[in-house]
């Protein structure tokens, strides 16, 4: 459900009352509701707490977030959940590339201003090595067609699925996360090819196919890389 441009994640449960939560680091809004709750009632409930939601999202999006990077030697950067020390090698006459050398994430560049772009492209290539194979595993598991897969910088989502266009987009930041967290996002988005919204059926499918999804979701959102 989308309210005022913000995605509201709805989960139907065997409970008596509606519960509202906002999670870091991206301000994800989650509502747990009794099975019989109508969408109209849920929308009214969310709007009645809108000021609280906006305030909590601001808090969540500044909670445990690493300061803006300068992309200089000595900074801590992550790949697949592991911390590396950034080393920028300025080599005007060498081929530009990014690679891991021991505990260092090395960026060899001709121009120091290119470091951020080189890193982003490196993360994109690493996800291209990981995500399509995982997507293929999951589409076979739930018996759907292989979608198109893209990788973009997205400020508020780990992934998104366009069911109509049969396309899944993954956030470049996923390359910094542990492998099991990446697989959770893949599973989540692939299941949206079957069930567009966060309906009870969607969560049943998620629970059946990935029983530890909640712990992976928490791990994904708590690790600020």
Image (cartoon, rainbow, N blue to C red):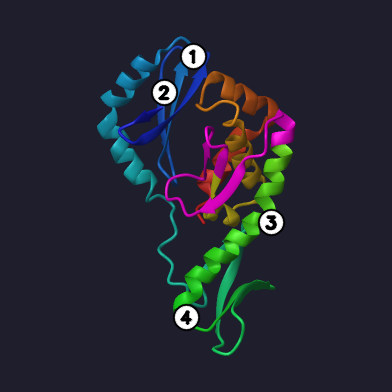
Q: Position of residue 216 (x, y in %)?
A: 61, 40
Indicate which label's residue lies in the foreground, 4 or 1. Answer: 4
Q: Position of residue 225 (x, y in %)?
A: 52, 57
> Which mark sits nearer the N-terminus, 2 or 4?
2
Region rendered in magenta: 139-168
| In contact (CB < 8 Å): disc 3 and disc 4 | no
Is residue 80 among the parts visible in the rendering? no
Q: Quadrant of residue 19?
A: top left
Query: Which residue is located at x 48 percent, y 70 percent?
Result: 116
The residue wearing badge 1 is 15
Secondary structure at badge 2 equals strand
Indicate which label's residue lies in the foreground, 2 or 4. Answer: 4
- Is 198 rendered above or below residue 148? above
Q: Is residue 186 left or right of residue 41?
A: right
The residue wearing badge 2 is 19
Secondary structure at badge 1 equals loop
- Is 119 rendered above or below residue 166? below
The residue wearing badge 3 is 129
Between the C-alphas of marks 1 and 3, the distance is 42 Å
Secondary structure at badge 3 equals helix
């Amino acid at each position: 459900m989308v309210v005022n441009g913000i995605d509201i994640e709805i989960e139907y449960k065997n409970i008596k009352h509606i519960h509202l939560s906002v999670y870091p680091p991206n301000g994800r809004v989650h509502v747990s509701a009794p099975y019989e709750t109508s969408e109209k009632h849920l929308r009214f409930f969310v709007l009645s707490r809108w000021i609280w939601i906006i305030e909590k999202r601001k808090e969540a999006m500044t909670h445990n977030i690493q300061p803006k990077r300068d992309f200089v030697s000595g900074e801590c950067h992550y790949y697949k959940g592991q911390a590396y020390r950034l080393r920028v090698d300025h080599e005007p006459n060498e081929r530009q590339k990014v690679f891991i050398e021991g505990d260092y994430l090395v960026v060899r560049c001709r121009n120091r201003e290119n470091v951020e772009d080189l890193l982003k492209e490196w993360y994109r290539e690493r996800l291209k090595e990981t995500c399509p194979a995982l997507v293929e595993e999951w589409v076979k598991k739930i018996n759907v067609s292989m979608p198109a897969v893209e990788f973009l910088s997205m400020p508020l989502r780990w992934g998104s699925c366009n069911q109509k266009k049969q396309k899944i987009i993954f956030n470049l930041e996923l390359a910094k996360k542990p492998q099991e967290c990446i697989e959770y996002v893949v599973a989540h988005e692939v299941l949206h090819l079957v069930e567009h919204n966060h309906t009870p059926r969607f969560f049943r499918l998620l629970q059946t196919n990935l029983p530890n999804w909640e712990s992976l979701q928490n791990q994904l959102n708590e690790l600020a890389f």
